[in-house]
Amino acid sequence: METKRLEKEIVFVSKVSVTKSKKNGKEYITYRVTVPMEKAKELELNDGDYLLIKAKKAKWYHLLNWEEMRKVYNMLPEEIKKEVDELNHK
């Protein structure tokens, strides 16, 4: 029987940086996203690896550590709590 190793899926927030450049009269825009060091280690990333990214724009409540703010978390609307929990695989 063959066993399949489940790929690790990690959720994190990253700030986008934009670089503009010109080459041969054409303007190019490059969008970059940084993977936090601890997340890269969890994913066991190596130079040249590819990431599958399912992205959406972060909202204010994605930027907070809710484990440290349980009292405030309990006051959130149910739809926000549900989204936070889904992202954290609870």
Image (cartoon, rainbow, N blue to C red):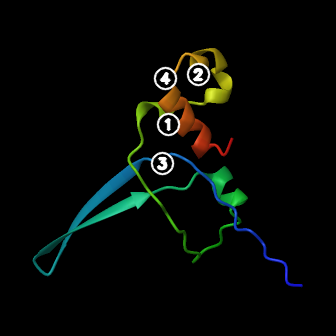
Cα gap from disc 4 to disc 3, whole angstroms:
24 Å
Q: Which residue is mark 4?
A: 77
Q: Which residue is mark 3?
A: 14
As drawn, 71 above or below 45 = above
Dot 2: element: helix
Mark positioned earlier in the residue sequence (3 or 2): 3
Q: Which residue is mark 1?
A: 62
**Circle on res. 73:** 2
What residue is rendered at 50% in x and 45% in y? 13
Q: Is residue 17 left or right of residue 78?
A: left
Q: Quick one: label 3, few (<14), some, or many (20+) residues within 10 Å?
A: some
**Kind of residue indicated by mark 2:** Tyr
Q: Work out which quarter of the rendered image holds the N terminus and state it.
A: bottom right
As drawn, 84 above or below 9 = above
Cα gap from disc 1 to disc 3, whole angstroms:
10 Å
Q: Position of residue 73 (x, y in %)?
A: 59, 22
Dot 1: element: helix
Q: Marks 1 and 2: which is nearer the front?
A: 2
Q: Marks 3 and 2: which is nearer the front?
A: 2
**Circle on res. 71:** none
Q: Marks 4 and 3: which is nearer the front?
A: 4
Q: Quick one: label 1, few (<14), some, or many (20+) residues within 10 Å?
A: some
Dot 4: element: loop
Q: Marks 4 and 1: which is nearer the front?
A: 4
